[in-house]
Amino acid sequence: MRALVCRQLLCRSLVSIILILILGSSSSTHATITITDAFVILTGGPSGSSYYYNAAGSSTNTSFNSISQNINLLVSPAITLNGGEVKTTATGGDYQNSNNYERLIYRFYNSGSSAPSYTTNSLTFRGENPSYPNYKWDVTGQTTQLLNGSESSGTYYFDVYFEGNGSWWNGSQQYFTGSENTDGSSSNPNRATFNLFYGATANGTQASAFTGSGYFNFNGSGQTYTLNQNNTYSGETQIQAGTVALSGSGAVGNSSVVRIAANSTFDISGVTTSASVNALSEYGTSNGGSVKLGSKTLIMNGGTASTTYQMKSIGVSGDTGAFTLNAANSSVNLRLYGTGASSSIYTGKTTVQAGTLTLAGTLASTAIDLTGGNLTTESGNAIDDNAVITLSSANSTLTIGGSDTIGYFGGTTGNISITGTLTTGTALDSSFAGVLAGNGSLIKQGAGTLTLSGATANTYSGTTTINNGTVVLQKTAGVNAIAGTPTINSGGTLKLGAGDQFAGDTTFLTINSGGTFDMNGFNDTLALQGAGTIKLGSGTLVINPTSSTGDNFSGDIQGTGGITKANTGIQVLSGASTYSGATAVNAGTLEIRNASALGTTAGSTTVANNAALNYSNATSMTVAENLTLNGTGVGGVGGSLKNVAGSNTQSGTVTLGSSSRIAATGGGLAISGNISGGNNVLFLLASDGLVR
């Protein structure tokens, strides 16, 4: 019988392939007439030949409810309702004839719209099939078009249910029992799903705008499809193979995401000014293509919260265009992973307004502005060596995950977190008023000046190395600009723009030969070593040595300011200095190994109680510095003035601020200057007769 039905349907529709889709069944409420099979006859369904889809009575077939078919709107699609068929069985003496009815009731609509009213098709009684109590009803040869050509893309529902009535013969008259045999209902219909989309596989240009909630797919290796309309479809843009090009005012800004497969391209070089996408991603996993910018700007202005979009690269060879990330949520992350020939090689500006741009690969852009979003590098050498990075929002963070070299960084606010080493500096000047954080290091090169300012302390704990140019520390006075260990090499200058820029108890400054520490008239505290130059101006340097055996500085200390020795450690000054201010030894030991280590005689040196000034020279030296002594040395041992090596002479005056001791524990010390001190007592301590 089924073969006969199929032959009849094929005869009635020679130009189309007819599918007979059999729906599930349910029993009548009165259990007198039962639908055993229900069919919908379609042209344009999921199978290429006539086939029974059945949910009841045939375990080998597929149910109508399982249909989920993709339909391409660019190939003149059609879905034709050709009719339907019902098979019923009577029980309990009930029966059917042409005075009964069976109906196919349906509706077809966009899932995003309100469901329309149902349309009813009455089926024709075909008699007993094959004999009482089995009956057949059908209607065939219809040509009802479910698609009218004006559909937009998206998901469409084809809802169908069947209903019929029972009847009873009392011997002389037929009585009807109402709608009692059904398959589905108006509120719970059988449902097939059709996904309408736009698809192309060859060179072409769209003829009209793409609309709706569906997607666009291009799968044409070596081919180009051009979008020149203001498209509003909200599904994905899938570039599975080949190139999708935007031209003129062509737009895909409502599309949920542009996905680009390997060896495929999204080309915006032909747009008027710029192109916007909601999100940008690879097609597949580790299978991304690229974006061709030309001289235009690509803007990513959407994305789903807490989502990382993977993309191989932006830009192809010769691109001078720009890229802006302005994500809809700060937790959106765009990760570019292409390296080498597959890296992001556009040279225009990169702007991150919101969200995070993560570089797992390399970026050739030489101007990067963080105006509210973040830039993160996962590994070294991710940013171009000449890139200029500007931060202008407190919400922005530049995270250096490896070691990288850039042109320079600057900005009025924001955060820079360094894990590896950040090398920066050109011949140009820059200023950064934000916060440097992390456990990484900073290297300054280039002849320009980098100014670190602002009211919030820098907390990065790695080293700071100045190889060339100048670093100016200009945080609010008392706010640390450098928390780690700075080193000034030949050709480099570290300059104060305000006082108290170091964490005095922990900062250890190394000034190598040819390097300069310019205090610029401000005061600061640190530990010190090296052989370079210190320019005090009118400021005071408080030296806080970290070593019990002696931190040694052999360079020149210049200016009109002074030196204060603090902390219990030992500081050695072994070079000739020219500063003219006063020297105060307030704690611990200050050891000089050069006659001019304490600067010119315009200033004097005062040694406090429990502190010591040591003279040490390999041969001999004559110190003309005027001294004021107090106490008997560190811990009351030795002397406030102590000779530890060499045959040395104190030719300057010695004033006893309180009862004091002068000692020689090594070498010899001659005092040729005047000694005064009122009623204070001078103790002379000689070892082996070395005090003369």
Image (cartoon, rainbow, N blue to C red):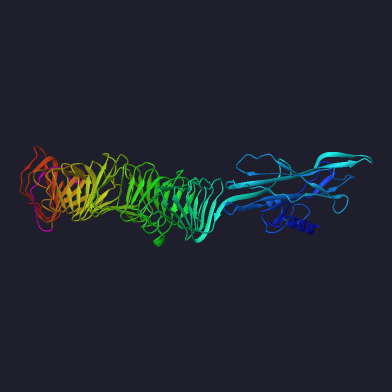
Coordinates of residue 477 in the picture (x, y in percent): 26, 39
Left or right: 75 as drawn, with respect to 57: left
- Which of the 4 quarters of the picture holds residue 412? top left
The image quadrant where one finds the N terminus is: bottom right
Residues shaded magenta: 618-637
> Which residue is more in the foreground, 314 or 661?
314
**Residue at image coords 10%, 58%:** 619
Left or right: 407 as drawn, with respect to 56: left
Note whether 649 is above or below 454 in the view shown.
below
Residue found at the far top of this picture: 679
> Which residue is more in the foreground, 25 or 443?
25
Q: From where the camera sits, is residue 567 visible? A: no
Coordinates of residue 247 in the picture (x, y in percent): 44, 51
Q: Is residue 634 magenta?
A: yes
Left or right: 631 as drawn, with respect to 479: left
Note whether 242 is above or below 605 in the view shown.
below
Coordinates of residue 362 in the picture (x, y in percent): 38, 57
How many marks the image carries: the answer is 0
Q: From where the camera sits, is residue 142 visible? A: yes
Q: Is residue 67 magenta?
A: no
